[in-house]
Amino acid sequence: MAPPSATETVLETKTAISPILEEVQSRKLPTIDEVRKAIPPQCFEKNALISIYFLIQDYVIIAGLYWILPTVEAYAGWAGLLVWYWFTGMFMSSLFIIGHDCGHTTFSEYEWLNDICGHIAHAPILAPYWPWQKSHRQHHQYTSHVDKDKGHPWVTEEIHFSRDFISRHFSRIPISGFFRWNPVYTMFGLPDGSHFYPFSRLFTNNKERVQCVISGLACLFCAGVALHLCDYSFYNFVKYYYVPVLFQGFWMVMITYLQHQDEEIEVYEEGTWNYVRGQTQTIDRVYGFGMDSALHHITDGHVAHHFFFTKIPHYHLLEATEAIKKVLAPYQGAYKIKSNYDHLFEFCRLNLKLSYLLGRGTGVLKYKCSKSYDGKKTE
């Protein structure tokens, strides 16, 4: 199928999208100061000791999972190992989220402590801390901006049809979730640039390149320690270290995707986008079964995190969320929350359904399956 030209795309969607743009521009939203004032002051307090406690807690849990591994394999075989992979990947994601606090400076008031603990949390799961910190910050600064939102690329109709068949449909394959974080995003650098190669397009000065090398070497050191603990058996290294890291990557891809994707999500172009409008396109997802707590509420407290990503530590997110719910309540649709006990199914379903955005050049982009597209829901 030949890709449509930009002119054809705009002509085909202008009738449908223009009313959407009018509706978006007519919506009232609070200012960022109004949202901030609604949040209790204690939510902005950072406590290094509490943060270190959670860092240690996650390491203890992961150590416990490795301690029970021989028993799991002995009594449950490969089926038990798959379950172990799933939960180990989840708790490795919990560890990642502690490093995530470090990167946002919500771990503590001390930059040096944030950087040290950030590397301690991220390097063992092969996430280069400083390069990730840079790319992730741009995602928060420009959430739901079609061109400037980093780490979460938005696929327009033109981009979709300019790709080859494999590139267009790779994300629709559920197993691709194991590779979209590591190695596709962090190592190969799609789309923001490699987080391991100091001369990739992600870095613009020598300080950033040096930081890339340091963070990369920290990951290499941890991988070397893992190889040593596996008695230099490549098979055991992959089975007991790299595969759990891939499961952690799957969890991160799934969590991030569900935070920002839905049939009714809106993405904005320059001139339509603003900070508050972009953040209201973030979705709180309740996973249930204790998983939200285990994942440090990055799932069900993500809206609050997005509004104040350098201000609120993870252990204050729920309290801040309740305040934000109240301030956004008068503004229809401004706060989004969904119960997703079926998070794995929902992740797979949306990856199959949401292929590309329509409306380039009109100010607001939406998926064709949106109920507001052309006044009806189309598949």
Image (cartoon, grey):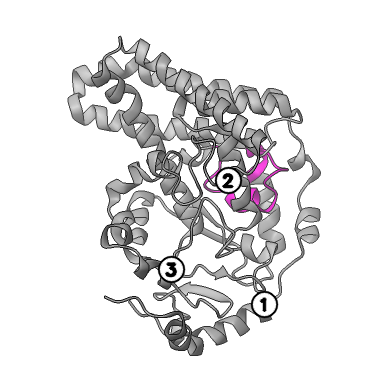
Measuring from the top left, give residue 180's x and y in whole percent: 38, 46
Q: Magenta segment range? A: 296-317
Type of amino acid under label 1? Arg
**Is label 2 or label 3 in front?**
2
Residue located beneath label 2 in the image = 135
In this view, 89 is above or below 354: above
Type of amino acid under label 3? Glu
Measuring from the top left, give residue 145's x and y in whole percent: 59, 64
Disc 1 packing (10 Å; few <14; some 14–19; many ≥20): few
Q: Which mark is residue 27?
A: 1
Residue located beneath label 3 in the image = 263
- From mark 2 to mark 1, how far is it between C-alphas? 30 Å
Mark sitting earlier along the chain (1/3): 1
Name the residue located 58 percent from the left edge and 45 percent from the top edge: 136
The answer to whether one can see residue 192 in this image is yes
Q: Is residue 257 left or right of residue 212?
A: left
